[in-house]
Image (tube, helix red, strand yellow):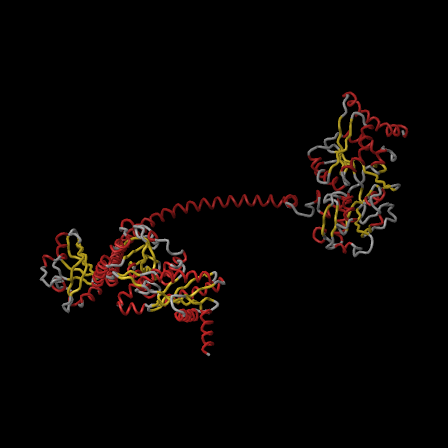
Amino acid sequence: MNLILSFFRTSLPLFALIVILIPLVAGGEEKIVHIGVLAKRGVVVAEKSWGATADYLSRKIPGYHFQVVPLGFDDIIPAVEMQQIDFVLANPSFYIELEEKYNVTRIATLNNRVGNLVASQFGGVIFSLAGPNEITRLTDLRGKRLMAVEETSLGGFHMAWGIFKEQGIDPYKSLDLSFGGTHDAVVYAVLDGRVDAGTVRTDTLERMSEEGLIAIDEFRVIAAVDNEGSNFPFLRSTPLYPEWPFASVTSVGRGLSSTVAIALMQMPSDSQAAIDSKSAGWGVPLNYQPVHELLKRLQIGPYQDYGRITYRDVFNLYWIWFVLGLMAFAFLGAAISYVTHLNNQLKISREKISAAKDFLEQRVRERTQALANTNSDLEQEIQERSKVQQLLQKVSEENRLLLDSAGEGIFGVDVKGRLTFINPVALALLGRTRQELLGDSMHSLTHYKKENGDFYPEHECPIYSVLTSRKTEKVRDDVFWRKDGSSFPVEYTSTPIIENNQVIGVVVVFKDRTEQKKMEQKLRQAAVVFETTAEGILVSDCNNRITMVNPAFTAITGYTEAEVLGQHPDVLNSGYHPERYYQEMWEKLSTEDHWSGEIWNRKKSGEIYPEWLSINVVRDQGGKISNYIAVFSDISTIKDSEKQLEYLAHHDPLTKLPNRLLLQDRLSHAIKSAHRNKSRVAVLFLDLDNFKTINDTMGHHVGDILLGDVAERLQECLREEDTVARFGGDEFIIILEQVPDVARVTNVADKILSAINKPYPHKDRVLSISTSIGISIYPDDGDNSETLIKRADAAMYSAKQQGRNRYAFHETAQMATNQSLMTEV
């Protein structure tokens, strides 16, 4: 019997494998089987770790080709739900949730191995960097940065969460919690100091140390559990839970699931598949109840509603009471239905009674409303009449205010000419009171005489004519009479008052024209002055464009008004004055609004003439320039007279030569010029010889003629720039400028002596005279005009003493005088 059982125990797996392989071999094609693997350390590590296992199963189970599908923490459940994988290899948390939701079945449990250490359970380890720091206990992690692998990771988060909860620590509220995505990422984050602590599944630190990725002594395990007595080979902080299960999904047949389970449990511990997965192969599936308990405590996965009472729970517990309640509710409904029927019958009766009552009440209301409407109409009519009365009073008051505030006189008369109303302005102008005029004839009181004193009949009055013509009448020049008998000029407008197509009166609006007539008189006077004045008048606008000229303007300039209208006054510009002259003119106009002065302008004929011009600025009420008014007169005659007077003041009337005054001016100017140019000036003092004899014997008339002839001969002997002046009587003085040397002076003196000695024919006689000349030189003989004339005079007397008809220099004359004095001594 034992032999038979042993045969079946040995042959049963082989028989099952044969049963599965027969149809596959018959089909001739391999079926692809997908193994979803949680890539706890990343896709590359997952493919490297479990690729050999897939190859192992493909070899062990002919007709099937197994492929590894690395899945992230968020991809496991969707892959099962969408039937993208046939088997799943993940942490127990995932398995529990998949078992509850999708009925996956575990077929084997992993025997984990690190080096020579083997374990079919695992836990979680919480760690920080070794060395001095303040984190030694779980409670020290409050407020610190903790990194876990994923929210769905059993060893990388759930196990640590379980012991945190036992310590009263909520990692979501009490810690600065973050997730790295893989176990390796969490280790590196702690190593780099990006977080204060981390939690991963057991064996992670040992594997990374074995792979040379880290040094395990760089880390400190927090809340470390002593493994003595448990034979667990890895560092840990949490209780132990079954290792990862290998599970099949519901779409996989039981035959294939059993075959895979057998193949996994037969995997040698030294096979390549075991070596790559760092395991010692697979064992029978363990009890995962501890994982269930952990998930219940954390209320996650399939137990997220654990401990909460649902409607189904309540119904299952109290279903009998629900049934009894429904029966009671049905009975109550029937009772309510019967009572409702009775109430409906009662309601119908009440409605009939109410309808009769409503009919009577409606009749009463209608009658009451009719009476109320009548009262309302009466009240409304009273209110409307009151409003009309108030409106009439308001209009009357407004009309009164309008009349009282008007700036012109206003009064009204009826068809018989009697005053019906009048405003204060009219009363003031007429010098009367309202009581004196109301009801009386306005014509007989204020309009009874014409301006010349003649009687003014009513039928000729323009105000009365409006009553029949029914048209507005405007009178521009008339008179009204005051109470004191005085009259004043008025302008008035008479307008008919028409009511129901009937003229019932006239409104008269008038104003006093006294000031206006005075202004008109002034304007007429100004117009006469404008037209008749001898001064030219030019008016221009604010842009200095000519708008008006008077006849005198045309008489002086030769331009007619039509030729200059719209032109700028510079049409008269002669070009005589520099631009600065006009700038100063406009500057004064802009500051003082007035300018006057002498100016040279050009007539239409082209003649330039002097004029005396006055310009005034006219400004409007706002202070802006509106016009320029220029008044001017031709002062050519005055200028000619000034020239004549100036000539007479500086010239001898007999000889037309410069007199003493002009001589002094020219000699001073010559001295200053010679001083600047370092040149010489000669002064020749002439006295006619024997002139007195001719003047006394032949008369002053002949003497005057002789002096005139001498003056002409002297001018002929000189240059244009030289000066000859009559000094007095028969004395003349000559100024020679720019004298290069004495020879020039002696040549002129000889020329003069010769010219004077020539005969002077006079009627039937011939007159003869000569002259004596005294000469002084600037700067040798003096540096001012008085000294030079005085010394030339002295030299002239020396020439006379020497025999007359000769010239003598001041220096020579002085020497001769000195010699004569010495001889006498």
Quadrant holding the N terminus: top right
Q: Is residue 621 visible?
A: no
Which of the two residues, 502 or 546, is positioned nearer the viewer here? Answer: 546
Q: Position of residue 676 (x, y in %)?
A: 48, 63
Q: Residue furthest right?
A: 3
Q: Position of residue 156 (x, y in %)?
A: 76, 45
Residue sitting at x 35%, y 47%: 355
Which of the two residues, 409 or 306, is positioned nearer the viewer here? Answer: 409
Q: Is residue 435 left or right of residue 362?
A: left
Residue sitting at x 20%, y 67%: 428
Res 698 → quadrant: bottom left
Which of the two residues, 697 or 107, is positioned nearer the viewer here? Answer: 697
Q: Is residue 7 visible?
A: yes
Q: Is residue 262 left or right of residue 73?
A: right
Q: Is residue 523 above or below residue 792?
A: above
Res 112 → quadrant: top right
Q: Is residue 267 left or right of residue 358?
A: right
Q: Is residue 824 above or below residue 492?
A: below
